Image (spheres, rainbow, N blue to C red):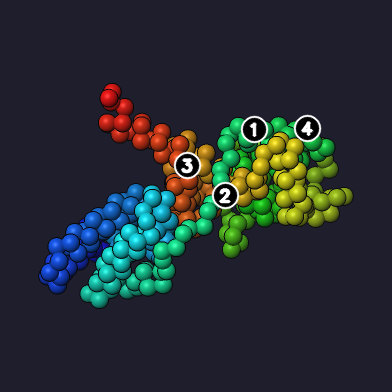
């Protein structure tokens, strides 16, 4: 039976108490580990052996997002190294997830999420271009389904279930996933298919030979962004925007993970740190003292 996280932390803190004379050291370890346990609880992880290196990297990124300094994050990482090394030494862990962890360094910036209004302008621009059926479908699938640009290029009609509104998508590592689509994407796909002739690819090349390349699809998105007057738009920004808007409207982290095709929940967790308005709104809505009168 796997040891609960609270028991692992208690065991380590007892070890610190018995080996270190410094009360300050004990309090630092306790504070750092309780905070980490709270973070893991949000991810549904209840044992130390469920923690992966990717989980720890996401935690460090979250600490940066919460405004902690490099020196404070270094101390917290040191606490985690001590904790996991102790568990491995007493046989509670086979592998130490901090062993290959570097840090801290400033995290890479995520592409910004577009506003819903900016996305609407892009879709309106698609309807006014030279190839509105194709361009509308490109936008609805990149934003509406958060497809990677390579997944969009490879999409076949045989993997589009118009009746049930499902896509069968071949993602990273040739892993298949099912992605739902809504009424807007459905109308765009119906219009694209109705103009015929229909080849095997949703976005066919000239004369129906092959499919549009990733480079061509990038150019389509760039042209639509210029028409709409929206800066900084790429297919990946549309994917980020979709994920952000889903979370802002109440979607669960687990759903967004499956929807995006992320293998690790910790990869999806970074989206929780990129929307300040969402954080403020949720705080105001849920904290008992957030709305009391001054």
Q: 106 and 29: which one is in front? A: 106
Q: Secondary structure at mark 4?
A: loop
What residue is shown with label 2? 111
Is label 2 in a helix, a strand or a loop?
loop
Q: Is residue 155 left or right of residue 171?
A: right
Vertical placement of residue 34 versus 91, above or below: above
Question: Which numbered dot is residue 120?
Answer: 1
Q: Residue at x 34, y 71 (%)?
A: 96
Height in image: 172 above or below 290? Answer: below
Query: Residue at 42% across / 50% down in the picture?
Result: 65
CA distance for labels 4 and 1 = 13 Å
Of mark 1 and mark 2, the one earlier in the sequence is 2
Q: Give the CA separation, mark 4 to mark 3.
A: 31 Å
Label 4 neighbour load within 10 Å: few <14, some 14-19, many 20+? some
Q: Secondary structure at mark 3?
A: loop
Residue 128 on image: x %, y %: 78, 32
Q: Which mark is residue 73?
A: none
Q: Which residue is mark 4?
A: 128
């Amino acid at each position: 039976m796997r040891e609960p996280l609270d028991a692992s932390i208690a065991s380590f803190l007892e070890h610190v108490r018995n080996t270190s004379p410094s009360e300050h050291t004990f309090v630092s370890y306790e504070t750092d580990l309780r905070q980490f346990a709270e973070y893991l609880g949000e991810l549904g992880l209840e044992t130390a052996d469920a923690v992966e290196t990717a989980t720890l990297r996401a935690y460090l990124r979250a600490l940066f997002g919460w405004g902690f300094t490099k020196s404070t994050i270094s101390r917290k990482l040191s606490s985690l190294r001590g904790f996991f090394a102790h568990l491995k030494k007493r046989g509670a862990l086979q592998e130490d997830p901090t062993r290959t962890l570097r840090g801290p360094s400033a995290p890479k910036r995520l592409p910004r999420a577009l506003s819903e209004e900016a996305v609407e302008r892009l879709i309106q621009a698609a309807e006014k271009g030279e190839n509105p059926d194709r361009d509308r479908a490109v936008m609805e699938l990149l934003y509406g389904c958060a497809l990677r640009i390579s997944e969009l290029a490879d999409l076949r009609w045989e993997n589009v279930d118009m009746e049930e509104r499902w896509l069968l998508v071949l993602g990273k590592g040739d892993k298949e996933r099912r992605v739902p689509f809504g009424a807007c994407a459905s109308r765009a796909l119906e219009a694209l298919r109705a103009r015929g002739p229909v080849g095997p690819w949703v976005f066919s090349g000239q004369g129906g030979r092959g499919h549009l390349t990733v480079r061509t699809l990038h150019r389509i998105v760039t042209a639509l962004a210029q028409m709409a007057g929206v800066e900084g738009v790429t297919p990946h920004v549309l994917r980020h925007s979709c994920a952000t808007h889903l979370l802002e409207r109440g979607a669960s982290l687990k759903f967004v993970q499956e929807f995006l095709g992320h293998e690790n929940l910790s990869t999806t967790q970074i989206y929780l740190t990129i929307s300040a308005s969402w954080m403020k709104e949720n705080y105001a809505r849920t904290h008992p003292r957030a709305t009391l009168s001054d």
